[in-house]
Structures are given as structure tokens and as C-alpha cells.
Image (tube, rainbow, N blue to C red):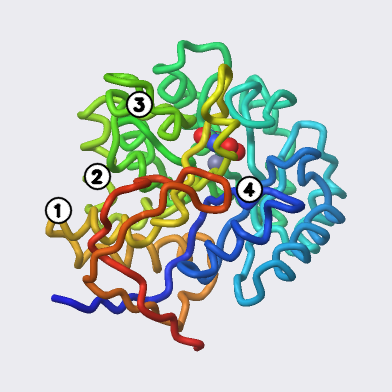
Amino acid sequence: MHDLVLRLPDDFHVHLRQDADLPAYAREARDRFGRVLVMPNLAPAVLRAEDVIRYRQAIVEAAPGLEPLMAFKLTPRHEAVELRELAEAGAVAGKVYPEGVTTNSEDGIHDLRQIWPLMEVLEETGLLVCCHGEKPGAFSLDREERFLDEFCETASRFPGVKFVLEHVSTAAAVRAVGSLGRNVAATLTLHHLEITLDDVVGGMLKPHLFCKPLAKRPEDREALRQAAFSGSPKFFYGTDSAPHHKGKKECAAGCAGVYSMPVALEGLVDVFDRAGELDRLEDFCSSFGADFYGIPRSTRTITLHRSPWNVPDLVDGVVPYRAGETMPWRIASVSDS
Ligand code: DOR
Ligand code: ZN
């Protein structure tokens, strides 16, 4: 097969950053996705309705044609009235960051139970809860697993609220999401489907593969791949493409984040193709996420050709995922409607 036509995918977890950095990252996303759920961990954070409106406007101006789905940072300090205003402003999800586990999360929560008082209004407004699922203070390789108890307890106790466990990285998280009700789903990234911790620190240090949650063991990666190929609507694509300028990665205290957007669809096609699972791809990247979020599946299409190209060493000042490698699939065109 030399041509692949897919329903235009959505990315349910992306970092587009702000100010001078925003246009390039947003346009890179527009080349591959119809809708993107935009993460709110800016400085200052996207917290209130006016922040959502302002940030959405900046994204639309930077990359006309890209449809941003807006998330805000959900904190125990939010008032019910603010959540209602956020929903009215078009936000679709609140993102929960545990304290100190990733970029700009110093003001995060210690325990998911801290947001239980907000569940009633979250259910009423239909706002989803997206969780960065890592337990502050736990040993770094155990942080995701240690978060699962409070996640499972919360998601079971509030079946009227939808929860997304973001960028799952362990077999334990896949099992937990699979065992929970229909109100629970998970996003999977491209890089967690491909790498293990050995790719990051097993030989020479690879700062451009350093991300949170850390890539884990081969058996964890295998569980993530099986989840992506399973046809279960609980697992869908969220790239967690997280650009940091080269100098912020290649330094003494480097930022976490993999800039996968420049290969975010081409690489995903390659993963499914090499596994002989291309039949499962469209549901994973273009249908299950929209279904879970309760938005229509896209009516647009994207066409890829099997035609090798080399990933640049640098894209807009950032070293992209798979820099310098040859990608077998290339994006050919996107339909208008
Ligand atoms: O590696 C990561 N980078 N993980 C996150 O959760 C946040 C992201 C970022 O914003 O850089
Ligand atoms: Zn993220």
C-alpha cells in the first residue's frame, strides 16, 4: 500500500506554549490534526474564563484552521461560579497537576481527593477532568502507579464525571483504566509507544527523550502498544508534544518534554504499520477521542504517502522526536471539509 487516507485525527493532549513560540508550534499541529486539546500549563496558567478566551483567540490567530479545544488548570481553589464561567467560555476540560511533577506544576495538588468538593459542578457543567497521573514525592519510576489508588477511587465515586488519565506509561495504568467504568479513558503518546527508559538513560544520556512521566520498562511499553492496538475506545491519541528550546534541554537542569509534533502522525502510522495494525489506526487517532469527549468525528480526511523523508535536526529551535531519522510515511494533503 502506498497511500493511506484517514479521517483527520485529533490530538487530545498538546502543549502549544505562548507568545513568540506559539505560532510555529500551532502551525505544526495544524498540518496534522483538526482539533487539539491545548494544555494550560503556561506561566501564568490558564485558570479562568478570560484566560481561556484570550488563549483560544491567540491560537486561532496564530494558526487559522486549527480548532483548539481548551483546557484550564483545575485547582481546589476554583469556585463553582468560576467553573460555570469556564464552561460557558467554551472550555471542555480541567487539567489536574500534582505538585512539582512536571513543567509549571509547583502550585499543584497533593491528592486528587482535594477536588472532590468540585465534582458536583463538574458533572453539572459537563467539564472533563484530565489528570497528570503521578504522585508527588514518590520515587520517580513509581509515581504513576502510586497515583492509581486515588484515581480509581475518584473515578468510581463520581461516575457522572468523565476522567482522562493522560499519557499513561505503565502496564498498571492500562489495567486500571481498563477495569474502570465508561466514564474513564486514557491518552497514549507516540513516544511512550516506542521508547523505554533505556532509550533515555541506558547508554548516552538522551535529553530530548526525557519527559514526564518517564518512559518505563519494556513490558510497560508492550502493554501500552497492546492498548493502542486493542480497539478499546478507552484508549486514544494524545501526543503530549511538549517543545522546549534546544538550550533548555541540553543543559545542567533540563526541562521534561518530547517535541513529537513534527512527526506526530507520520510516526504513529509507522508504529501501527510495522505492527501490522493499520486497521486499528483510524479509531485510535481520529474516532475514539472525539467519541469520549462527546464531539462529532471529523468529516475531513488526511492523506499520507509511503515516501521516505528525513526528520530535520532542528524545527523552530527545538530538537524534534526522531531528529535525523528517516520516516517512511509523509503527509500529502488535508481535505477542506
Ligand atoms: O514531559 C512533559 N512535558 N510532561 C508534561 O506533563 C508536561 C510537559 C511540558 O509542559 O513540558
Ligand atoms: Zn503534557
Q: Earlier in the sequence, mark 4 or mark 1?
A: 4
**Front position among marks 1 and 2:** 1
Circles 1 and 3: CB atoms closer than 8 Å: no
The image quadrant where one finds ligand 1 is: top right
Q: Which residue is mark 3?
A: 200
Ligand 2 lies under 8 Å from the Cβ of mark 4: yes
Kind of element beneath mark 1: loop
Residue 235 image position (x, y, % from top left): 36, 51
Q: Which residue is mark 2?
A: 225
Q: Earlier in the sequence, mark 4 or mark 3?
A: 4
Q: Amino acid at mark 1?
A: Ala
Circles 1 and 2: CB atoms closer than 8 Å: yes
Kind of element beneath mark 4: loop
Q: Earlier in the sequence, mark 1 or mark 3?
A: 3
Kind of element beneath mark 3: helix
In the displayed structure, would residue 232 be above or below residue 67? above
